[in-house]
Image (cartoon, rainbow, N blue to C red):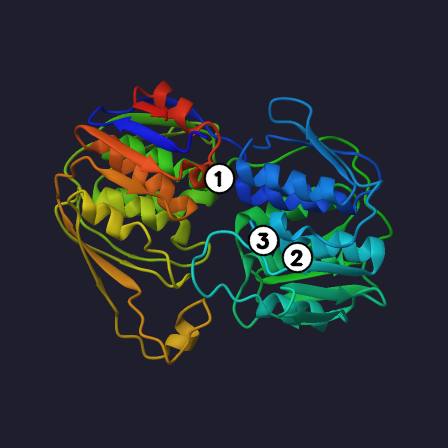
Amino acid sequence: MEDSLLIKGGKPLKGDVFLSGAKNVALKVTIAALLFRGKVVLRNIPRINDIFEIFSLIHSLGGEAEFVGTNEVEIDSKNLSINKLDFLYASKIRTSFMFFAPLLYRFHKAYIPNPGGCRLGARSIDRIVEGLKALGIQVNYESSTGYYSALMSHKPTGTYTFIKPSHTGTELLIMMSVFCKDSVVIQNCALEPEIDDLILFLNISGAKIKKKGSTITIWGVEKLIQKNPFSIVSDRNEAVTYAIAGIVTRGDITIHSIPENYISCFVNQLKEVGAGVEYIKDDSWRFFYKSALRPSHIITNPHPGFMTDWQPNWAVLMTQANGVSIIHERVFENRFSYVNELVKVGAKIDFFQPKVKTPSSYYHFTYDKTKTYKQAIKIYGPQTLHNGVLTIADLRAGATLALTGLITSGETIINNVSILERGYENFVSKIVSLGGNIKKI
């Protein structure tokens, strides 16, 4: 199977990119559709590997999920007959844990294996399990099988406060509470705008969900019925990748279309380093190389801060800045898998650990006092990167290494491209449309 990219870099990328639907919305609304009575139609769903993995899980449970158009999906849960997720499929993708909501409402008991996805360090599931228990759901883990089992003996109710905000946890508890008894209140919720899209999808279909600040209140309803197809928002992580592609290759790319509040922190950082940014209209943006780039000091944070998903791409941009840049990773323990690969092709990057007074509360992952951490890097620029053979370890690192190949001279080979394709639709054809020399091999 073709699982590598051959890139001949050194060309400015220029042109227009039409963004695909947001991966982090598509996965959640596809699973949430299993809560509905009748068929559900979703639009702007990207054809990415993670979506097809979710389809496989739905099929294994007896449900129906398929593309009925280029980016239009139809889902039907009427024939769900199994309450246990297949270990092989579920272990590939972290979102599989969200199947607890439709399965518990259908069968009252469900079995889901320890979820998979990119291995980015201490992504503790404990906060999510604690949230389920707070709503009255019994949850146990069997280490010998690798499965979590959950029992819902009555409709959920109650209040839960996240110790640290959890994107997936917030969305699962929302889904678990749609048919609750009376009401459920979730506090210290994650603020990512993708959560707003999930809430909109549920509310226009009969749910009663209100978000105020970091508190979400859900009043129970009897059913969800879709009246019209639902179209999801564009992918802001994809937007950032192509924006940086335009700047770092000294090109000029216009992106259609992403709301300003989805990328405002990123746009502000680009302006600070001297990159060209121009808002056009109708949520379209122009990103271009304007002049020599200044260095930056980035600290990743949940929304509305600088996303952890953006920092690998940003690191490539900073290899071309004039001076020393710093990236301090607060969200995940292991988000620097790309660094050694960049060093292979000429980047100068050093790891270090910033002084933090209370690391257990400062970092969003589960901090282990017995471990030694290096949660930050210094990037020295500008560096002339050369070609090489690089290997992708996680999704966002995949885009980072592809960007690296696009700015180097000669031929670069990127291995494990299937990981990149977990979250990027038509990556090769979009780069080709911008003038890039790239193909799968």
Residue position for label 1: 423
Rendered position, 335 above or below 255: below
Amino acid at the residue labelled 3: Ser
Quadrant location of the C terminus? top left
| N-term mark: 2 or 3 | 3
Question: Looking at the rendered structure, which numbered label has been put on residue 172?
Answer: 2
- Between label 2 and label 3, give the one nearer the viewer: 3
Task: Say few, some or many: other residues with alpha carbon within 10 Å of mark 3 (under 14 / 14 to 19 / 20 or more).
Answer: some
Looking at the image, residue 378 sits to the left or right of residue 436; the answer is: left
Residue position for label 3: 91
| N-term mark: 1 or 3 | 3
The CA span between labels 1 and 3 is 17 Å
Amino acid at the residue labelled 2: Leu
Task: Say few, some or many: other residues with alpha carbon within 10 Å of mark 1 (under 14 / 14 to 19 / 20 or more).
Answer: many
Amino acid at the residue labelled 1: Gly
The answer to which quarter of the image holds residue 403 is top left
Looking at the image, residue 55 sits to the left or right of residue 383; the answer is: right
Q: Which percent across, then down, holds residue 375?
A: 31, 65
Question: Looking at the rendered structure, which numbered label has been put on residue 78?
Answer: none
